[in-house]
């Protein structure tokens, strides 16, 4: 138990080190095909296109955060006032950007959405643009956190799940699973991106508890009945809980005056 508390404290601390609400400077490029991002490291597949209307992004490792950054939402705008709007557009992280020359690689739709009306093709010709960005809460109105059972799952022991519609300005850093009505919890590990798994899946209907961080703050969220006893691969299940916490950390030298 002491080891688990130490490990959990480390997770919460590491999540707190980034100032999520600050405004940052970087560069952004784009992928010509949206499926390059939907099939990215987070593991969303075609479901990624439903997260933000196809406004997808690959983020550098500091934004991807070993998968904890999957599903995070950012407001991003380019600095060319002639071509670009002051509002910019919002994007969802679905992949890692391995190119250290840019902070983001956006889907074409998201890249063009930064432009002023009628300037979409002009911004595409630039290829790469200087941008400002900040993390924002993800909003999924009337949508609970969802758990999708992955096709790799094999009863009775191996269970892999993917998390969808994670709202707020949050990261899920740990997951436990137990049979409904039981207090015998088994931890799950992050397999990759938004996918978690365990080779010790309990029998019967399953409940989950999630460690959710928002800035320096972290808490348990308990989803009491999620998977039925006859859960099936490829099916998305409603967790019955919503996540909408906002980053609470104190950010120094943040500048919001120009957004």
Image (cartoon, rainbow, N blue to C red):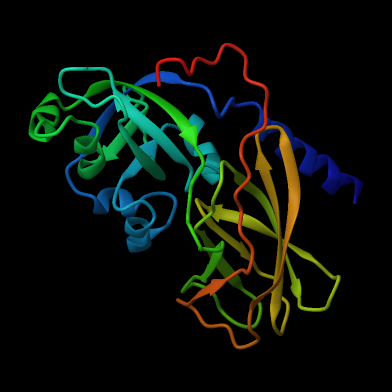
Residue 129 screen position, x and y as percent: 23, 22
Q: Nearer the viewer, residue 73 or 43?
A: 73
| Residue at x 19% of width, y 37% of height | 112
| Residue at x 25% of width, y 30% of height | 29
Judge whether residue 95 can be spotted in this image: no
Against 44, residue 247 (above or below) is: above
Q: Quadrant of residue 98?
A: top left
| Residue at x 16% of width, y 23% of height | 83
Against 109, residue 130 (above or below) is: above
The quadrant the C terminus occupies is top left
Residue 125 screen position, x and y as percent: 9, 28
Q: On the rendered structure, is 29 left or right of 172?
A: left
Against 248, residue 131 (above or below) is: above
Q: On the rendered structure, is 250 left or right of 30?
A: right
Judge whether residue 8 can be spotted in this image: yes
Residue 206 screen position, x and y as percent: 70, 76
Residue 148 screen position, x and y as percent: 51, 69
Q: On the rendered structure, is 88 left or right of 68?
A: left
């Amino acid at each position: 138990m002491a080891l688990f508390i130490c490990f959990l404290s480390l997770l919460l601390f590491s999540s707190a080190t980034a100032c999520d609400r600050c405004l940052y400077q970087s560069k952004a490029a784009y992928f010509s095909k949206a499926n390059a991002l939907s099939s990215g490291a987070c593991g969303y597949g075609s479901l990624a296109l439903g997260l933000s209307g196809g406004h997808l992004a690959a983020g550098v490792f500091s934004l991807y955060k070993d998968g904890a950054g999957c599903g995070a939402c950012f407001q991003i705008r380019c600095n060319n006032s002639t071509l670009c709007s002051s509002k910019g557009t919002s994007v969802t992280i679905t992949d890692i950007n391995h190119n250290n020359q840019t902070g983001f690689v956006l889907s074409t739709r998201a890249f063009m959405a930064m432009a002023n009306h009628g300037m979409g093709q002009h911004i595409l010709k630039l290829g790469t643009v200087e941008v400002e960005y900040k993390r924002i809460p993800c909003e999924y109105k009337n949508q609970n956190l969802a758990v999708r059972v992955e096709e790799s799952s094999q009863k009775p022991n191996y269970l892999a799940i993917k998390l969808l519609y994670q709202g707020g300005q949050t990261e899920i850093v740990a997951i436990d699973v137990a049979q409904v009505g039981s207090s015998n919890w088994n931890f799950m590990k992050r397999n990759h991106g938004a996918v978690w798994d365990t080779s010790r899946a309990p029998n019967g209907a399953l409940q989950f508890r999630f460690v959710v961080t928002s800035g320096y703050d972290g808490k348990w969220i308990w989803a009491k009945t999620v998977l039925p006893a006859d859960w099936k691969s490829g099916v998305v299940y409603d967790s019955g809980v919503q996540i909408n916490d906002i980053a609470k950390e104190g950010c120094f030298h943040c500048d919001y005056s120009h957004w």
